[in-house]
Every structure is written in structure tokens, then in C-alpha cells.
Image: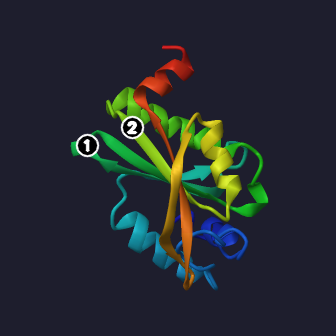
Amino acid sequence: MDDAEDMYAYAKDPETVKYLSFDYYKNLTEAKTEILNYFVKSPQGKWGIKLKANHKLIGTIDFRLDAPDLKAEIGYAIGCENWGNGYAPEAATRVLRLGFAELGLKRIEALHCSENPKSGRVMQKIGMQKEGVLHNNTQLKGRTVDDVLYAITEDQWRKQIGK
């Protein structure tokens, strides 16, 4: 709850949440409710992204583990005032390391709305490869959109990091 004001500050901007499943926050209470319902209720695999300089929360990253199949899906959100600074790739790179080096996963994937190529660029920067387009895959703010699937395998990751 200590980060509620920071979360509200970035998620009240409609541009930030344009491609996310939730609408922009209209007040601080909505941010607190989201923290309770999403992060506190089920905290495993969910982290805040904070600036080192001032410890301000600027986004989140989550890791949805599918342990039986040795794979996971990542997702991230950064406040639009911090787009283009490399924060999403930095956080996602750490999550890849967790998945492959610590948990022994064989595959990590991510989806982005086809209308949001900047998110796909983050996936490319961390070494993910585009695998295809899932047509009419997601309901986004009252309309159906296509998603683009990216993934990286453990072998690809190890080659990428030189191990």
C-alpha cells in the first residue's frame, strides 16, 4: 500500500493503460483497491518496478508460472512518462534469469496487442522471437484485438548470455 500514490500517478493516465486490461484510475482509492485485489491477494510472481534514484514506483512486471509445463508468461506495464528509458527490458531480463537460471524453465513467452508494437520491441530487446499472431484473441476495452506472441527458450537464452 506504500506504493499506492505512485501507482495512481502513472495509471491515471489513459495513455499508460491504453493496451492494458484495466481502465485508468480515476482516484487513489481505485489504485488501492487494485493493489489489494491483484497484488496483495495473490502476490506470487508480481513485482513493482522502481527507480533506483528515488525508489518511486513507475510500473509493474508479473510472471505467470506454468510449472507442470516448465514455462511461464511475463507481462509488464510502465507509466508512459518513463517509456523509452529501458526500464521494461531491464526488469524483464531479470525475470528471464529467474525463470531459466533459478527455476529451470524451458520456455518463457509474452503477448502484446498488435496495436502496441512498442511492447513487442521490448520483447525483441530481451531476445524473444515472434512466433505468430493470435487473431481475435483478447477483449480490450469493449473490442476484440489481435495479440502477437513472442517467446524465448532456455537454450536461446543461454546462447544469448554466453553460457
Q: Position of residue 39 (x, y in %)?
A: 42, 64
The 10 Å Cα crowd at callout 1, few under 14, some 14 to 19, many 20 or more, is few
Closer-to-camera residue (17/40)? 17
Instruction: Say which amino acid is labelled 1.
Output: Asp
Q: Position of residue 161 (x, y in %)?
A: 55, 20
Q: Which labelled disc corresponds to residue 69?
A: 1
Q: Is residue 1 above or below residue 70?
A: below
Q: Secondary structure at mark 1?
A: helix
Q: Secondary structure at mark 2?
A: strand
Closer-to-camera residue (159/93)? 159
The extreme top residue here reads 163
Residue at (70, 77) in percent of width and height? 14
Residue at (57, 63) in percent of width and height? 3
Q: Is residue 33 above or below residue 93?
A: below
All told, the count of numbered labels is 2
Instruction: Kindly indicate the quadrant of the structure image that contains residue 42.
Output: bottom left
Closer-to-camera residue (85/135)? 135
The 10 Å Cα crowd at callout 2, few under 14, some 14 to 19, many 20 or more, is many
Q: Is residue 149 visible?
A: no
**Mark 1 or mark 2: which comes first in sequence?**
1
- Which residue carries the number 2 mark? 107
Q: Position of residue 85 (x, y in %)?
A: 76, 45
Question: What sort of colour scheme is used for the picture?
Answer: rainbow
- Alpha-carbon distance for marks 1 and 2? 9 Å
The extreme left residue here reads 68
Closer-to-camera residue (138/41)? 138
Residue at (67, 65) in percent of width and height? 115
Side (left or right) of 73 relative to 87: left
Q: Position of residue 123 (x, y in %)?
A: 60, 44
Instruction: Say which amino acid is labelled 2.
Output: Arg
Side (left or right) of 49 relative to 33: right
Tell me, yes or no, whether the two marked residues, 1 and 2, touch with CB atoms within 8 Å. Answer: yes
